[in-house]
Image (cartoon, rainbow, N blue to C red):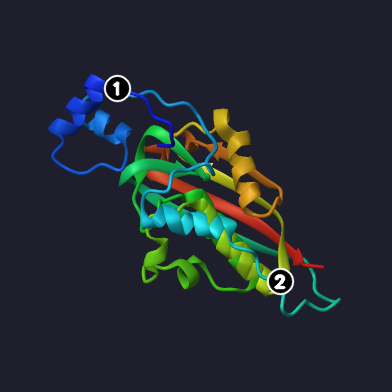
Amino acid sequence: AQTPQGFPRRILETAYADADQEYTDDAAAVAAAGHATTTVAGDAIAFKITTRADLDRARALVSPLPKSATPLGESALPRVGIGTDVHAFGGDGSLWLAGLEWPGEQALSGHSDGDAVAHAIVDALLAASGLGDIGTHFGTDRPEYGGAHAEAFLGRTLALLGEAGLRVGNVSVQVQARRPRLAGRRAEAEAVLSRALGGAPVSVSATTTDGLGFTGAGEGVAAFAVALVVPAR
């Protein structure tokens, strides 16, 4: 949860007095004590730096992108890549999907935050650029990406494309899931993802698959992305 957070002093003091573990913020402690909490939607980039993963995410957002070292020749054509990613429900903490936090929804499992949408976009961009896949650059052997969010993944991918003399043309991604319902936050998700990709157009769509498959059964989320990359010139 972001800040500021406000609670009646008596409830907050009791929550911490009864706590049997450490919490990263007041909201988590109060919720663990059995009290209902209410959230107000904020900007996904205005996050609170509490953990090492939060710090890595912030660094990725503010780090300058490297200039292209080797621009592609005049004969280079636009390139297209396809990416997919799947995560099951059952992770710890909040659900993160399409670069947004979804309070009250069950988290997805994964080495990072389990954001299948962001990961599918990364795979599509890397495939289009001939730079391997998400495991090549963000595998489980890279502890700095443990718990990382979309901005860290997309920001680093954008830097890799820049080093290869490429930029993002546009991205289209489809989400297959019964929950969360993306319709009400589609524009917000597109804006967050686009901003993380340097302003490139991003479109997000969703389907429930009519109850078919593991996504239809509500066991997880799948995402399929198509990305166009063009010479950076």
Residue displayed at 52% across by 41% down: 46
Kind of residue indicated by mark 2: Lys
Give me the residue at 48% from left, 55% from top. 57
Q: Nearer the viewer, residue 231 or 226?
A: 231
Q: Nearer the viewer, residue 37 or 203?
A: 37
Secondary structure type for disc 1: loop
Identified at 41% across, 51% down, the residue is 114
Instruction: Look at the image and tell me whether residue 22 can be seen.
Output: yes
* Numbered label attached to residue 207: none
The local crowd at label 1, few if under 14, some if 14 to 19, many if 20 or more residues have their Cα within 10 Å, is: few
Q: Is residue 119 visible?
A: no
User: In which quadrant of the rendered image does the C terminus lie?
Assistant: bottom right
The percent position of residue 159, horizontal first and vertical second, equals 62, 66
| Left or right of residue 73: residue 88 | left
> Is 192 in front, or is 127?
192
| Residue 66 position (above or below residue 194) | below
- Report the disc number at residue 67: 2
Looking at the rendered structure, the secondary structure element under dot 2 is loop
Q: Tell whether 15 sits left or right of 3.
A: left
Q: Which residue is mark 1?
A: 36
Q: Is residue 6 left or right of residue 137?
A: left
